[in-house]
Amino acid sequence: MSPSPDPTAPVSLVTGATRGIGREVSRQLAGLGHTVLLTGRSPEAVEWAAEETAGQTGGEVRPLRLDVTDDDSVAAAVAEVAHRYRRLDVLVNNAGIHYDTWQRAVTADLAVVREAAETNLYGPWRMAIAFAPLLRASAHARLVNVSSESGSLATMGGGTPAYSASKAGLNALTRMLSDELRGDGVLVNAVCPGWVATDMGGPGGRPVAEGAASVVYAATLPDDGPTGGFFRDGRPLPW
């Protein structure tokens, strides 16, 4: 990774960004002039996605290998970002797994639930802890947790227990982080991109660009924007 030629450009890191919503969020942020750190678990996939996204936008898109479930991987990413940029302006916690439509809570395989929580809840939590010093070093930091209305207690029913419970936990984490980082000027929000036509969402959903735009909204809020909220398309959702 090499530094952005424009040291004033916002530095944004997107997890789970080799495909789907994360990839499109990276593309949109690069189009807005951000230096984008496009991350994923596979070095080959990260290299390929970053190169293609940079070619599409003409922007700075840099590959960074990162597994949000691995402490050493996260620590290495923090060290790299600190060395190259000395700050992080936007953290998008997008990596997510197990939309478990085949399960019910009363018969759930708890191994699947634990695995979902490791990526969907503990992953963003691990990232927030590790990158908090670099976010505090930014004058306009934004932390966005890509959640789902499936995690809304107000509308929750049965089904998808691993995914829904982990996203409900992510929403709770959003509220805690927003309160604790408010004094540092870090705006922390959760976003539901909606049902999007991705590998996880399946066919029939809204275009990926529309779902990603919800995330980019929270990533580019003005300094007097909301914090501790839950949004889709820039409009509040019930917790």
Image: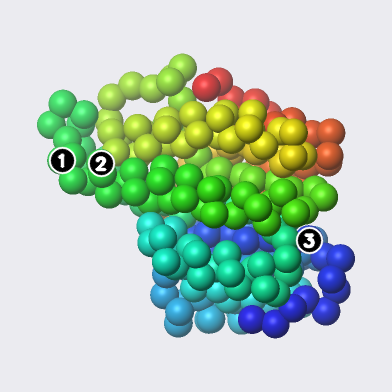
Q: Is residue 22 visible?
A: no
- Name the N-terminal-most of marks 2 and 3: 3
**Residue drawn at (51%, 70%), measured in percent from left and top?**
76
What secondary structure is marked by label 1? loop
Q: Quadrant of residue 208?
A: bottom right
Classify mark 3: residues with Cα within 10 Å, few (<14), some (14-19) or many (20+): many
**Residue drawn at (66%, 67%), measured in percent from left and top?**
82
Q: Disc 2 marks which amino acid?
A: Val
- Horizontally, residue 58 falls left or right of residue 50, namely right
Task: Find residue 129 and name its label.
Answer: none
Residue placed furthest toward the left: 107
Q: Contact (CB < 8 A) between labels 2 and 1? A: yes
Task: Find residue 113 and name its label.
Answer: 2
- Name the N-terminal-most of marks 3 and 1: 3
Classify mark 2: residues with Cα within 10 Å, few (<14), some (14-19) or many (20+): many
Q: What residue is shown with label 3?
A: 10
Q: Disc 1 marks which amino acid?
A: Asp
Q: What residue is shown with label 1?
A: 109
